[in-house]
Amino acid sequence: MNIETIQSYYQARGLQWPDAKDALWFFLSEVGELAEAYLAHHKNELTDEEIAMLEVFSNEGFHADEIVSRVDGWVRNNDRVKKENIGKEVADCEMMLSVFMYSLTKSTPDQALLIKMEEKLGGDLQQLA
């Protein structure tokens, strides 16, 4: 995702841009929400071990949410009442991962991924086209 679009979204919503540490807590909270949403739709397709692992992620996401909720100036706007929309949770994870990466390094996950791909392919991404 284009970081300028995310920054414009934050500005339009009147949201405070988090530092890297807080963005990481937000991201982990979103991962927990994604795990919870996936369980809500796909529990019958999972093994007991997989269910237990996703429940751990969900609970740890709650814990991350509790941590970030104690930071002055942060107000979480999701009470996890609606767990059904996996797409929205994936989008939230992508956004918060981008915010975390940009706050930490002034680059984006997309940029880091391209660099990693170039390294793995010996510097030639043209072969993917």
Image (cartoon, helix red, strand yellow):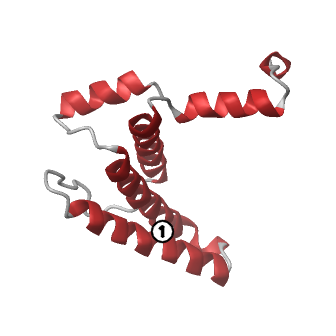
Q: In the image, residue 23 lies at what x, y percent?
A: 36, 48
User: Residue placed at 81% from the left, 16% from the top?
Assistant: 126
The amino acid on which the numbered mark 1 sits, given as a three-letter code, is Ala
User: Residue placed at 33% from the left, 61% from the top?
Assistant: 82
Q: Judge left or right: residue 55 versus residue 79.
A: right
User: Residue placed at 20% from the left, 39% from the top?
Assistant: 16
Determine the image quadrant of residue 12.
Answer: top left
Q: Residues within 10 Å of mark 1 (few under 14, many from 20)?
A: some
The residue that label 1 is drawn on is 40
Judging from the image, what secondary structure is the residue with disc 1 in?
helix
Residue that sits furthest to the front in the current view: 105
Q: Judge left or right: residue 29 versus residue 121.
A: left
Q: Judge left or right: residue 25 versus residue 72.
A: right
Residue 55 visible in the picture: yes
Q: Is residue 28 above or below residue 107?
A: below
User: Residue placed at 49% from the left, 70% from the top?
Assistant: 57
Q: In the image, residue 129 lies at what x, y percent?
A: 80, 17
